[in-house]
Structures are given as C-alpha cells and as structure tokens.
Image (tube, coloured by chain):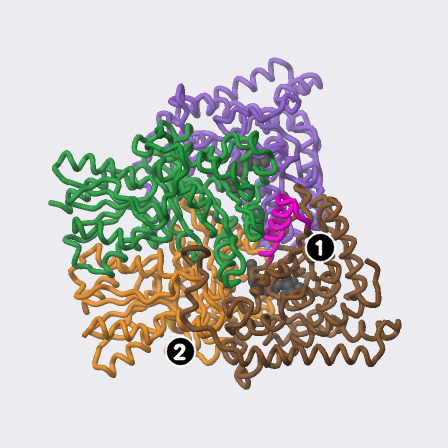
Chain colours: A orange, B green, C brown, D purple
Amino acid sequence: MSRILTMARAGREALDWEMERRDEIFVLGEDVYNFGGIFGTADGFGAKYGPERVINTPISETGFIGMAAGAAMAGMHPVIDLAYIDFIGVCYNVLLNTASKTHYMSAGQVKVPMTLMIGTGGGYNNAAQHSQCLHATVAHIPGVKVVYPSNAYDAKGMMHSALRDPNFVIYLTHKGTAGVGWMGTPLKTTLSEVPEEPYTVPFGKIAITREGSDITLIGLGMSVHECLKAADELAKDGISAQVVDLRSLAPLDRDGIFAAVKKTGRMIVTDEDYLSYGVSGEVIASVVERDPTVLRAAPVRICTPDIPIPFARSMEQAILPLAAKIADAARKMVK
Amino acid sequence: MSRILTMARAGREALDWEMERRDEIFVLGEDVYNFGGIFGTADGFGAKYGPERVINTPISETGFIGMAAGAAMAGMHPVIDLAYIDFIGVCYNVLLNTASKTHYMSAGQVKVPMTLMIGTGGGYNNAAQHSQCLHATVAHIPGVKVVYPSNAYDAKGMMHSALRDPNFVIYLTHKGTAGVGWMGTPLKTTLSEVPEEPYTVPFGKIAITREGSDITLIGLGMSVHECLKAADELAKDGISAQVVDLRSLAPLDRDGIFAAVKKTGRMIVTDEDYLSYGVSGEVIASVVERDPTVLRAAPVRICTPDIPIPFARSMEQAILPLAAKIADAARKMVK
Amino acid sequence: MPLSPELRRNMYRQMVRSRAFDDAMIGLYWVGKTPIFAFANGPLPGELHCSNGAEPVGAGVCAALDADDMITADHRPHHVAIARGVDLNAMTAELLGKKTGLSQGKGGHMHIYDTRVNFASSGIIAEGMGPAAGMALARRLQKRPGVALTFLGDGAANQGAFHEVLNLVGVMKLPFIAVVQDNEWGVSTSKKESTAVARNSDRASAYGMAGEYVDSNDADDIYLAAERALARARSGGGGTILELRTARLAGHFMGDQQAYIPEQMKQIDPNPLYRAKLIREGVLSEAEAAAIDAAATAEVAEAMRLAQEAPYPDPSEAFDHVFAGADA
Amino acid sequence: MPLSPELRRNMYRQMVRSRAFDDAMIGLYWVGKTPIFAFANGPLPGELHCSNGAEPVGAGVCAALDADDMITADHRPHHVAIARGVDLNAMTAELLGKKTGLSQGKGGHMHIYDTRVNFASSGIIAEGMGPAAGMALARRLQKRPGVALTFLGDGAANQGAFHEVLNLVGVMKLPFIAVVQDNEWGVSTSKKESTAVARNSDRASAYGMAGEYVDSNDADDIYLAAERALARARSGGGGTILELRTARLAGHFMGDQQAYIPEQMKQIDPNPLYRAKLIREGVLSEAEAAAIDAAATAEVAEAMRLAQEAPYPDPSEAFDHVFAGADA
Ligand SMILES: Cc1ncc(C[n+]2csc(CCOP(=O)(O)OP(=O)(O)O)c2C)c(N)n1
Ligand SMILES: Cc1ncc(C[n+]2csc(CCOP(=O)(O)OP(=O)(O)O)c2C)c(N)n1
Ligand SMILES: [Mg+2]
Ligand SMILES: [Mg+2]
C-alpha cells in the first residue's frame, strides 16, 4: 500500500524498519531523544528504542561523530543527526580524515558503515551561519558517498540504501523540502506516493523528474523544486523543459547527466550552494569534457553567489536561485 | 637589486619587511618560534622579534586560529602558520564561519585582516592524511581570498599583498614548490629573480607562464610546473603549449582564463586536488558558460582522482597529475 | 566599586530593558506565524533565542565592566548586548532586517555587532571563545587596557573550542573571562545528561585558572563575582571560568514547547525577585521601580516603532561588505 | 596479575623488539637521503616518527590487556603496535610500501591497522580519541567485553577532541583509557610552553574520571598503573587519564636535530635501565638478556629481508578499497 508522505516521514519509516530488525543500528545526536532529530527522522524513537539506541549527545560534534566512527569500525551502524551543515566546521576532521579514509588506509581491513544525516539550505532568514548548503564541500572528500533526496519516495529508498551500505554515507536533506512544520506547508512536489514495504533507491543515478525537449534544467535538493516551478512557467510560453534531479553527488551519474543534456542541447544548472568550486562547475565540466558539441548554447549557472547569506528577506530572496531566475535564463537561451 | 631566491625565502623577505615596519603584524602557529613555520617563512624571527611577536602555540588549531581572528578584529594583523592543509578539519569552523563572515555579518563594522599560510600537496609519500591539496574546499568559502603563488617572484609579491589586505587571506604553497630542504632540490621553475625592494602582486590575475599557440595548459601550485615540463616535452613534438598559472582562486580571473583558452581553442586543466567539485570543473565551466564555441576540442582534466592518497610510491606516482599524463592528453587533443 | 544604590538601580534598569525588549520581540515574532508556525513567516523571521530569565547575567557582569573591555556573545545575546549598551534602536531594527539595523539587515538576531561598545556575537556554539582570547591578546600587544569576556551556555562548555582556548588563556595568562551561563539546558538536553561534572567552573583547575560558581541568578552576587574575576584579570592574575546559575524562561527558541522539562525543574523568574529585593532594602520605592519599568517599555516601544517604519535594505546591498577595502 | 618474572621478561622482550624495529627503520630511512636529505627519497620515504625511548609505555600497558581490548594510536605507533602483537613482518612491509604490508602499501607508518589484534592508528593529532570511545560503546551495545585505549601525546591533550571525548566518556561511563605519553615535547614546543597544567592526568577531575601519573618510564610501574585503570574500566568504574612520563630519544621525526632541547632536558634511555634492573633483581641473567636482544634483532632482520624482497603494489591497486561492498 502506498500513501502520500512528507520526506521526513518517509525517511523515518525506513529508519524505523531497519532499526526494528537490526541491532547494530543506533541513533545519536543532539536532542535526538526528545526531538527525534532536526527533521523528526527519529521521532518517537526515544520511547520505542530506549536511551541505549537513541543517544542524546552533548554539543560535541567532533566527539560524538568520532565516537560514531569508532562504533562503526567495531561492527555497529550509527545513524547521526548533525542538524545543520553549517556545523561541519567543528567536526570536519572526522568527515575528511577518519570516516572517509579508514577503509582505504587499512586496505579494506576496517569498514565504517555509518549514516550522517544533515540538513542544508536557507530561504527562511536564518542568516549566514544557519543557511548554508556546503554540499560541494562534503562531496569533494574521497571515500564518502553523498546523497540528496528531494522527494519522499527517494527519501525512503535512499535511507534504506544508506543503512544497508557498508560505507560512510552522508544523507543530505534541504530543510525546505523535508516537510517539517517549522518550515511551513510542505512543498507539493516533495510529497510522493510511498510504498509501505521497504525498497531501495540506488545511489549514483539521476532522476528525470519531468520530461522535456527544449532545455534541461538540472538541480538538487531544493533547487529541483525551483526547476519544476520554472518548468511550469516555461510551459506557459511553449517551452518544454526537462528537469533532472542529481540525487547523488558521490557517486555522480555523469552518464545520465550527459544523456539528459544531449537530448535538449541546452543546460541550466541550479544550485543553492555557493557558485564557485561547487556542483554547478562539476556538472558542466562533466558534460563538455565528453563532448562540447552537444551544447547548442552556452550553459548557464543559477546559483547562490559567493557571498555569505544575508539575514533580511529582501536580500536573501534576491540571492537565492529561485524559479523566476531560472525561467528567465531558460527563455533567453531557447529563443 | 635582484637575486634568485626560493619561494620560501622570497615569502620570508616580504614578511620580514612588513614586520619590521608594522607593529600590528605578529606570527603564530605550532613551532614557529624554533622552526620558523613549515617553510621557514618566519625563520630566525623568534630571535629577531621575540616571543611576543612570534608565538609558539599548543596543538590547538581551533583555539589559536580563533584567537588570531579575534586579534585581527581588534586591530592586529596575525600571520598564522597551519603547516599542512590536511589539518583544516580540526579548525574549519574558524575559516568557514568566523574569519570569512564577520566582516559581512557586521556590515563592515568589523575587519578581519589576517593571513593564513598553509602548505598543500603530496608527491613525497606522506600518505592520505598529509598529502592533500583541498584548495577547492577553502576557495568555496565566500568572504575569504585564496592565493597560491607558484614561484619566488609571486611568493614575495603576494605575501606583501596579503599583509596589506584588510581581509582574511589564505596563502597556499605547495610543499614541493617552496624550495625547502626536506622536499629536496628546489624545482628550477620555482626559482626566480626577486627584487630586494618590496612590491605587490595583485590578487585575481592569472599569469601566462609560457607563451604558446596550439593548446592552453592551466594549472596552479605544483601543477604549473608539471604543465611547464609537459610543454617542454610537447615542444619537441612541435606542439606549442601555453601555460597558465591561476595564482589566485578567490578572486578567480575568469576573463584572463577565457582569453588564454580562446587564443588556442584547446584546454587542459591540471590539478593535484581531487577531481570532483574542485578547481578543474570551475575553470572549465567558467570558459564554456561564456562561449563554448571557443573550444576546438573537448576540454580535458588531469587531476588527482577521487581517492585517498596512497602511501606507496608506485601507487602515489600513478595517481598524481604529472607531466607525462598532461603531455599525452595534449598530443591526443592537438593531433 | 561597592554595591551602591545607584549601581543596583542601574542593574535593575538593564534587566527590565532587556525583558521589555524580549517581550516585544516575542510579540512580534508570532505575528504571521499563527495559526501555522513556520520560521520564515512574519516581520521577524528566522530562529529567535530570547534571554528571558538570564537578565541578571547581562546586568550583573556588564555593570562591572569598563569601556575598554570586550565581549563576544553567543546565539542568545540580547541581555548581554543591552546591558553592555548596544544601541537599542539599531539592534531592534537589525532583528527586523532593516537598513537602519546594526548590520544593515545582514546579521539578524544571532549576529549582533556594535564596535562602539566592543560587542560581538555569533551563532556557532563556543565560537566566541577564540576571538575573545584574541581580543585580549591584541590589547596586550598594543599595550592597551581591557579584559575580554565571552558569554556562552553550559552546553557550550563541552565543545572543543572551550578547552583549546582556556588552555591558551592559561598558558598566556590572558585577561579573559569565560562567563558560562548555566540554565541547565542545551536545547532539550539537560546539563546532567551532557556534562560529566556538576559545575563547569570546577574545570578551571584543568587550565591553571580560577573558577567561581554563583548559584543565585541575583544581579548583586553576579556583579561581585564579576568584579573579582575582572580584578584578577586586570592585575595579571589570568583568566576565570565564571559560571552563573541562570534561567531560560522562554524555551530554547520560539516554538519550543519545553515539554521535556519536568515539573520540579521549572525555573524561577529573577526579575520580580530582584525588584522586590531592591524595594525591600530601600534601594527603590515602588513608584521608582514602576517608573523604571514604564521607561523601559516606552523605550522599546519607540525602538520598535522606528524599526517598523524603517526601510528594508535594497536587494542589491546583499553584495556589499563581502570584502573590506578596494574590493568592497 | 602480579608482576611475575615471566611477565617482566616479556615486557623487556617487547621493548627490545620495538627498539630493534625502530633502529632498523632509522637505518633504512637514511638510505638514499644522504648527503641531501629529502622526505621523498630512498626505500622508506615520507615522515617517520620513531618510538625510541617510549618502549616501556607500549610494553607496560599492552602487557595488561586482554585480547578483547581495543587500541587506537597516533603518529608514533610502533612501540604500541609491536607490544600489542601486530604482525611484525606485515608492519615492516607496510613501512616500505610493499604489497605484503598490513595495508598493502596504502597506509605507511602512521596508518597501522591490524584488526586481528584490534589495533588502529592515524596521523591527525588526537584523532584516535573519538574512535576509541566508539569502540568501547560498540562493545557495550553488543554486550561484549573490552576496554578501549587511545594512545596519544602530551601535546595532543590540548586538542578539542581530547576534551569532547573525555566528557562523553565521563557522561556515558565508558570503559576507556586515554594513555597520555608525556615526553615533554610536541615537535619543538615544550609541554611547559603549551600546557596550562603540569599534568594532564589532573584534568581528569574535569570529566568526573580518574587520573593517574606515572613518573618513571619503567615498564613495571606502567603495567601496574594500567592494571588499575583497566580494573576500574572493566568493573564499570569509567574512564581514566593515564599519563606516563616517557622519552623521545630520536627526535620528533627523522631529520629533527633537536637543537631546541637544552642540555638539562636531555632524556634517558629506559631500555638499558630496565635490562639492568631485571638482571639486578634476578629476573634475567645477562645471557638471557643477550639472547632476547639477539632474537629481537634477528626477528627484525628477517622481517626486513622479507619486506625488501616483497613486490611493490601495482599502480592500478591505488583504485581499490575506496569503498567497501559492491563499489569496491
Ligand atoms: C557547533 C554547533 N552545534 C550545534 C548548534 C545548535 N545549537 C544552537 S543553541 C544550542 C544549545 C546551546 O546550549 P547552551 O550553550 O547551554 O546555551 P543556551 O541555549 O542554553 O543559552 C545548540 C545545540 C550550534 N549552533 N552550533
Ligand atoms: C591536528 C594536527 N595538528 C598538527 C599536526 C602535526 N603534528 C604531528 S605530530 C605533532 C606533535 C605531537 O606531539 P605529542 O602529541 O606530544 O606527541 P609526540 O610527537 O610527542 O609523541 C604535531 C604538531 C597534526 N598531525 N595534526
Ligand atoms: Mg544552556
Ligand atoms: Mg609529546
């Protein structure tokens, strides 16, 4: 049976299913016991699984993520809630040098199966230190898988995949897509039919979220939804836009991206992360290094510019990669 | 008067000149007092300037870089030695959220003039946690300038520029280019005529390190020298390669890059940092988003693949972006 | 300075100014956020961490400071900022994201900067530790007076930055005070659950520095303890961990129902207690106290009026202030 | 277990095995690096941090361990690895970057992993803290026995990770021991210059745990202190900071001239002292001691021979082991 779920509830369902069956999975993070984590992915788990498997931690991200890595090395599968990606600064070494590299440095002797859930993004006026995306920063680390569902179906399937993966997986969710109360009414396009049975969504495959023939709009997380909105606008002008959801940054589906761009010959990459040294450059380079001649026009990037996120709504809205900008760029490119 | 200097000595000369004249400059980091920092940039400064201005710190990178940021906010200009960029993991928050964003978040009330010197790179079998480049990681942060001299002339001029800049500047040096003893004989191409007088090299301008007309080889730090070696090889085959030294990642000279690529119609981007979500993608995207038709062939990236750096020389040499790979790719592209 | 009536009246005044400010902000915060709550809605969007209950900390410590002293505060900065003398109009405007705000709308409530009174704050836990130590170091190098204080929560004392910076302060004997505000909670996690010792001030011995705990949430006691720590710092005696029992009456942030707080842990409002004490001890008459209360309410109302009338920044201003100097 | 002759002979044996290993590595290290020194040259490239002088720490602590116990070590891991029983042939081959190495040449000397004996090490300062705590936690969750130990330097005790993890250990009462090896230096910076307290073991009170300092660099004393800490951990008594005075006779790493060390701080070699003590106390005869010494030298020579004869990994192997499972 399928129901329409939010991403947060869909992810929770997968985690719950796996935890019921596998003793090696436990959850830790700040306030996971009472609050169930930033998106409520462990909502109610405190009562259900007890404080041994749902561990409230001090505000010690280096300490508890390092601890999680050690538990993973010793046969557990920790699931960590890091709330906001802005906080990676205080624990980056564990991501960069420990969890991601131990398997390699030990030539496979040691496995580090752990899932790190992090919320990304802004758009709700939380200013420069609580609105960042930074997904390119974590995706630049070798030895970690980075996935980024943008709808409930993928949220559940990718959570199952993450929990069954013998590697360090960073599972990102844009705050605005999760469908949690404090971010307002869930976006329609994030809600999807979610089967009750468990299923996996493989990493490293893009999704074609909307078919189209004139132009390819590529996004991830929240920007997928901005692309979809833009595609609706463009349809009114008779422009048929294909929308690609990257879904997985590491591995990145370069074949899928290339095929999708080739189909229309035009590409716009949207990204709420900072423009430079990020996803947008990587995606464009991945296409043109195969064959620049598939492009009938110069590719365009609609990203957050290289500036800290301003607090005031007037300024923040102006710098975000919103649908109107995407649609404008698409119109210029197609005409 | 000019002399031939190593990068390390050239940078030291600039720092010494500024410190002699400006009380607000002081140096801090692990072992700077006795060892003068990783490249000896503060060699002998302990005796000359005393322990108040040359501060040996505990192994507390979050603590002392945070402290440096506060000193900068209060009118000083700290110069920090962080040794290896692999260590950013334990202090990343100071870079990401404090030093880079305070000026913006205070709407210009607070300035954070500080210079963070970091060594990058491998090639000497120091394995996965002491050989990384990670320059894309720091260059992705808005509000920080990231510069990367690759020869002695620029090392001095950019050090003067950094010390006179009212912003947070990350000054990177590839260990293999610095010309310090423990990395062996200095590379010829890093040594240059260095005037005794102070001078500045502006940030945000590429250097054309070698003129050429058939293909443009773009690099930074160590990979500039691999490009130069490749260009020598290619010259023997009658291929004229232009070599571009990016020198500055933030700001990035997109105009200069575009012009250099347009001139030859062919580009290879080399980078010792991990391939994905790095400099190579950004450089390629910067060109094609202006005009993909300047390219007469698909651009090629010669970078360190997305794997941790292996220890053994047989494996490390195989994954580094060395001249032979660059020359091979160039030959294929030109013929 | 002894506890003069003047000083105590002023501490009370700062406490009610801070409370009036927070109450006004809470009122405004809910505009546009009911019946459906979302951070992004209304004229005061984003997260909001109010200081209700912690006013004695700001008032008591700041009353003991000199103009030369420097402060870094955390995600809950209002009570400290106000007691320190941060421009109330400009601070109000900043919370509303207006052009007339301290940071011209760029900062918001966690990023309060007022260089006029050496005040800064930021939103990453324990982030203020290093910068405060650096401010203290800068003054020493510049041969200028000034003690640096960082205000942080009890939860923040478990961050690595706390340890690294206190060790640096200990080694360098910097004039530095870590004001640990013990409200027993870090979001929904109790101090008992998160902290291996009952008092963070006892951790001072790990850094060769002084530690003091004040158990009362009373401005007088806090003032006197701050004076002791400041005297130590000014005379070259090094740093102090000054831990102050306080309260967090309005929850972690707006929207926090505090259902996790057991009945016996309900916290007491310090402001009416201090008011009653000053009246009881003849420092204030009821009428004088009422006048202070009314003045604070009026001052905040005026600040709010000005802020609401002020313009929003132009979208293009987002691109200003990324860099200082020629690239600005 | 009491200090039996058998145990003490074995500790001595581990000390000389470790010394023989390091001396052999130092010899090989300089091959190809004279007259001009460069990290990259010769059959043993990269940085090399030898354990000469610290052998009693590895021998004394590891002699007290059970097979179930788990270790994370730091950039100076040889003495601990060898005393723990890491495969000496495979470890030697790893330092030489050979296919037969513990990590098939991927790790090098700072990244020694041998899951057979629950041993891991890594090169970022204090990085082993969290993983060791996690191993202890895993065992608790799995209802399996085992104490986790992390070996780190005195310099590492000023890292944030030290604080965060000890607090976690304190709160969770994990069976955990932080073995702080006090050799008085972190590279060229003295403990006095870098650390606000004389003894890191005194910092234990900041985490509600036990702290003990052993001043002798003597394997017997270290063994007994380790036994006390282990007994506490096994009986649910929580963690210990066990700080051990030790020595760093071969400098921070190869190439370090140690010119910064003043004459009066010159360190003493513990190995001949322990040898003489065991002979004096009748635990070993001179001949038995000589036999142990000779056996160690021979064992290392054989390991070196095997390692030198072994093949280098094929360049293409660099791409293996990035991920486990289907993507491997
Ligand atoms: C490094 C980091 N981790 C987590 C957070 C999220 N966070 C914000 S406030 C807070 C609780 C802080 O508790 P405490 O320091 O006691 O201050 P209080 O809120 O009680 O005043 C947390 C966990 C953060 N801002 N930064
Ligand atoms: C986070 C980090 N900072 C700096 C270094 C460089 N480094 C390697 S060993 C070392 C000194 C360590 O001193 P200590 O912990 O006392 O160990 P010892 O070398 O004395 O055994 C330093 C600074 C590092 N590896 N990691
Ligand atoms: Mg608190
Ligand atoms: Mg040491």
Residue closest to the eye, A6 or A157:
A6
Residue C90 appears at what percent x and percent y? 58, 71
Q: Quadrant of residue D71?
A: top right
Residue B269 appears at what percent x and percent y? 26, 48
- Marks counted in the figure total 2
| SS class, disc 2 | loop
**Mark 2 C-beta to ligand 1 under 8 Å:** no
Q: Main secondary structure of the magenta part?
A: helix
Q: Quadrant of residue C214?
A: bottom right
- Ligand 1's image quarter is bottom right
Q: Mark 2 belongs to which amino acid?
A: Leu
Q: With C149 as the anchor, is B259 left or right in this view?
A: left
Q: Mark 1 belongs to which amino acid?
A: Asn
Answer whether residue C137 is magenta in the image.
yes
* Magenta range: C126-145
User: Counting other residues with Cα less than 10 Å from the Cα at mark 2, is it few (<14), some (14-19), or many (20 or more)?
Assistant: many
- Residue B307 shows which numbered tag? none
Q: With A128 as the anchor, is C235 left or right in this view?
A: right
**Mark 1 C-beta to ligand 1 under 8 Å:** no
Task: Quickly name the residue at label 1.
Answer: C200
Quadrant (top left, top right, bottom left, bottom right) of the N terminus of chain D: top right
Task: Quickly name the residue at label 2.
Answer: A191
Report if residue D100 is visible in the image: no
Residue D125 appears at what percent x and percent y? 54, 42
Can you name the residue that lies furthest to the top here? D287
Report if residue D11 is visible in the image: yes
User: Counting other residues with Cα less than 10 Å from the Cα at mark 1, is it few (<14), some (14-19), or many (20 or more)?
Assistant: many
- Which residue does the image show at 70% across and 40% down from the upper left? D197
